[in-house]
Image (tube, grey):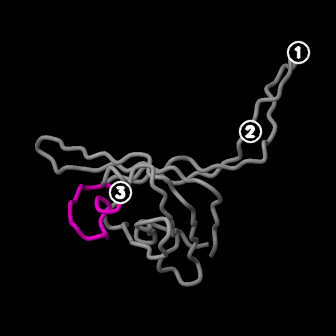
């Protein structure tokens, strides 16, 4: 098994939910919290039980994704600010792909899913470049292909 590093990873998104034109925002992202898919469980232990018990509800979910980097205000549709920075983008649905094996022939692992734009923050700091923080909530099924 080959190891993967920062150069092997790509983040692409659509500018609207109805388009198949993905934009690569990898070069604008400096921080990313990763992605976690989990089963939703319900606590099921009863009175008198000495240990906590759980049942699987049949639902799976992915945690919110948080991406950060340097703020840029280019007017082109390829930048993070142009795709997510307008007030009308909040609550909008997009598509996202995370490619964990970019450039590794026959070994790409692409996770594809819909997202809802939860928040987009501009973070000016004295003596530093302005940063952004984007939070998106995955919605619906996550498909992973190689």
Q: Residues within 10 Å of mark 3 (few under 14, many from 20)?
A: many
Q: Which residue is mark 1?
A: 48
Q: Which residue is mark 2?
A: 41
Q: Which residue is mark 3?
A: 84
CA separation in Å, label 2 and label 1: 20 Å
Q: Element at badge 2?
A: strand
What percent of the width, then of the height, locates residue 123? 24, 44
- At 58% from the left and 71% from the top, the residue drawn is 109
What percent of the width, then of the height, locates residue 96? 49, 64
CA separation in Å, label 2 and label 3: 32 Å
Which of pointers 1 and 3 lies earlier in the amino acid sequence? 1
Q: Nearer the viewer, mark 1 or mark 3?
A: 3
Q: Element at badge 1?
A: loop
Q: Nearer the viewer, mark 2 or mark 1?
A: 2
- At 47% from the left and 73% from the top, the residue drawn is 19
Which of pointers 2 and 3 lies earlier in the amino acid sequence? 2
Q: Element at badge 3?
A: helix
- At 36% from the left and 53% from the top, the residue drawn is 88
The magenta stretch spans residue 132? no
Q: Is residue 92 left or right of residue 124?
A: right
Answer above or below: position of 143 versus 106: above
Quadrant placement of the C terminus: bottom right
Magenta extent: 69-85
Residue closest to the eye, 74 or 100:
74
């Amino acid at each position: 098994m080959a190891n993967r590093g920062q150069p092997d990873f790509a983040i692409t998104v659509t500018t609207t939910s109805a388009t198949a034109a993905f934009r690569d925002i990898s070069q604008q992202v400096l921080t990313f919290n990763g992605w976690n898919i989990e089963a939703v469980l319900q606590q099921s232990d009863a009175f008198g039980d000495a240990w906590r018990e759980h049942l699987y509800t049949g639902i799976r979910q992915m945690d919110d994704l948080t991406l950060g980097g340097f703020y840029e205000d280019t007017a082109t549709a390829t930048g993070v600010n142009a795709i997510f920075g307008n007030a009308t983008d909040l609550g909008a649905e997009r598509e996202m792909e995370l490619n964990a094996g970019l450039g590794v022939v026959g070994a790409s692992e692409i996770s594809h899913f819909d997202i809802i734009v939860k928040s987009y923050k501009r973070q000016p700091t004295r003596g530093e470049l302005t940063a952004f923080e984007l939070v998106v909530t995955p919605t619906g099924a996550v498909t992973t292909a190689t």
